[in-house]
Each structure stands twice: as structure tokens, then as C-alpha cells.
Image (spheres, grey):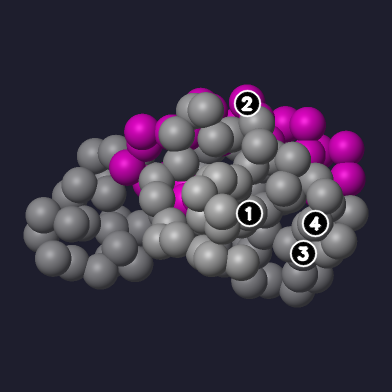
């Protein structure tokens, strides 16, 4: 496998990225039927300041195929505390379900404020 650098997830990557999660021996079972919601959730979050999706590709034999995906998010203080409180669970499936109801992600304005003021995002959450 000749992994290339990662790149930002684009809308065209979402379908295959979800299939990668679905086929993963640990992640697939954790998401269960909720994996169906990943497509719409990821597509709705692309371009948000608080969401970053990444794609890792294998470039063997001049053929490029997606082999891994990764996601990072900035979430509210309340959601973070909830996720760190026992009974622990996998963050991805819980976050996906929550995003369908009400988003725990920071707004674009909150992320920009934290970046522009060189302050800790923790302090932004606490305000």
C-alpha cells in the first residue's frame, strides 16, 4: 500500500467514505443501522468551520482508491462533558444521532472567534 497524504473530504468522497466505515470490523458494528445517516450528516457538515473530514488514498499502480476516512469536530462543552461521563460510548454513532436532532457543534462564529483571538476553545465553550 502506497498511502498518499490525506486531503480534505469532498462531496464526491462521502458515499465511499461511509462504505469504508460500514465495512470496518469495529466501526461498522458500532454504528449499526445508524451508518445510513452518515451520508446526509457528513454532506450537511462539509464546509462548516467546526467540521473537518479527511480522506486517505492508496496510490498503488497509478490507480487511486480511498482506503481511510477521518473526521474531527469542535463540539459544545455540554456535549463534551456528556461524552466523558460514564457510561462511555463510541463518539461517532452518538454524534451522528445527535446531529440529526440538534447540533452540538460550535457555530462558525464561535470557531472563528477562538481562532482570531488565540484563545482556548475551552474558554469559548465556557462563555
* Badge 1 vs badge 4, beta-carbon distance below 8 Å: no
Asked where in the image residue 35 lies, by quadrant, the reply is top right
Q: Where are the magenta residues, as a range?
A: 31-55
According to the picture, the residue beneath numbered tag 4 turns out to be 24
Residue 11 vs residue 97, the one in the foreground:
11
Residue 4's disc is none
Of labels 2 and 1, the one closer to you: 1
Asked where in the image residue 82 lies, by quadrant, the reply is bottom right
Q: Is residue 51 magenta?
A: yes
Of labels 1 and 3, the one closer to you: 1
Residue 3 vs residue 30, the one in the foreground:
3
Residue 40's disc is 2
Of labels 2 and 3, the one closer to you: 2
Determine crowd level at label 3: few under 14, some 14-19, many 20+ residues with C-alpha closer than 10 A: few
Identify the residue at image location x=32%, y=42%: 49
Question: Which mark sits nearer the N-terminus, 2 or 1?
Answer: 2
Is residue 24 in sight in this rendering? yes
Amino acid at each position: 500500500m502506497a498511502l498518499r497524504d490525506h486531503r480534505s473530504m469532498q462531496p464526491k468522497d462521502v458515499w465511499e467514505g461511509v462504505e469504508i466505515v460500514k465495512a470496518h470490523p469495529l466501526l461498522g458494528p458500532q454504528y449499526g443501522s445508524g451508518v445510513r445517516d452518515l451520508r446526509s450528516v457528513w454532506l450537511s457538515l462539509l464546509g462548516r468551520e467546526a467540521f473537518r473530514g479527511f480522506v486517505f488514498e492508496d496510490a498503488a499502480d497509478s490507480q487511486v482508491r480511498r482506503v481511510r476516512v477521518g473526521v474531527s469536530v469542535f463540539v459544545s462543552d455540554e456535549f463534551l462533558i456528556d461524552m466523558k461521563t460514564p457510561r462511555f460510548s463510541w463518539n461517532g454513532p452518538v454524534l451522528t444521532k445527535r446531529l440529526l436532532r440538534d447540533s452540538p457543534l460550535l457555530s462558525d462564529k464561535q470557531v472563528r472567534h477562538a481562532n482570531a483571538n488565540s484563545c482556548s476553545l475551552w474558554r469559548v465553550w465556557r462563555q
